[in-house]
Image: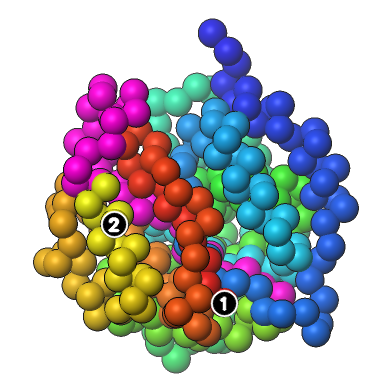
Amino acid sequence: MSRAAAAFDAFEPEALARSGEQTVWQPGDDPLPSIYLSHGAPPLFEDAGWIDELFAWSTSMPKPRGIVIISAHWEAAPILITAPNPATGVVYDFGGFDPRYYSMQYATPDAAALGAQVSTLLSDLSPVRDTPRGLDHGAWVPLKVMYPLADVPVVQVSLPTDRADVLLQMGARLRALREEGVLVIGSGFMTHGLPFLTREMVEGKVPGWSSDFDAWAWEALQAADLETLADFRHLAPGMPYSHPTVEHFTPLFVTLGAASDLSSVRTVIDGAMWGLSRRSLELV
């Protein structure tokens, strides 16, 4: 049996060198995009193709001066933020995996200044509270692939609600950060019907409820139809199988709120893992 995270281990040495050579965003550069990614959890570290796709995405743009990420795995109200420093551990909010994953770290630079800025921007929506909680796996797992040197300050913001209108407003308030070299990320999974996984799905079959939801969402995204997307519980095919709980879809609304041009949406990563849509996208 191969060692856990063998694909990541093979990827890391060259990626560290390339990440060290990556040009850092400078004033006068174009704003960084607003992105939504399907984060993959620990199995991402076993998937060489997916690792390469995420790293190619991150290196297709200047390295951010900071990252603000909203993950499916932190639902809390009022709005909470964590601004880790190198001494802050990550959150191992998953179970049943190889012990290797519970020793992996992602010690990013102090993010206190960016955290204070985020807090100010969001404070007119709700009270904002700081917490020493570290980055959860919806944040640190994909970021460990995208920015393996862990040299970008990261602020994680909680999901305070599943209401699309509030999440769009959150994104809109974060939009200005993109003009300062900050990457805004909504981290979820385009379909996430884990209770309905079958052996056939794990072996590569994509069920109709997953492919139908994905196609519906992509059509609405291309049409910039926020009203339809917001009513996904009632309008989307494949519900509730694709999202028996909705927290892996709703970070998309923060991404959309942070975008300047909804018509600019493009898919960067496609395909499926265990029959679940990996669609990941960006907007300017």
For mark 1, give the secondary structure: loop
Q: Taking 82 as reference, is 203 left or right?
A: left
Instruction: Tell me if residue 2 comes above or below residue 136 in the rendering.
Output: above
Q: Is mark 2 on a helix, strand or loop?
A: helix
The spot of residue 245 in percent (x, y) is 23, 54
**Vertical position of residue 150 compared to residue 261: above or below:** above
Residue at point 80%, 84% (across, down):
28
At horizontal 77% and vertical 79% (from top left) the residue drawn is 29
* Residue 33 left/right relative to 91: right
The magenta stretch spans residue 203: yes
Q: Which amino acid does label 2 sit on?
A: Ala
Most extreme residue toward the top is 1
Check the image and name the residue furthest to the bottom.
124
Q: Name the residue under label 2.
A: 215
Placement of 133 over or under 209, stated as above or below: below
Q: Which of marks 1 and 2 is in front?
A: 2
Q: Residue 284 carries which label?
A: 1
Residue at (57% x, 21% y) in the render: 4
| Rendered residue at 48%/32% (across/down) | 43
Q: What stretch is highlighted in magenta?
A: 181-210
- Pick whichever of labels 1 and 2 is earlier in the sequence: 2
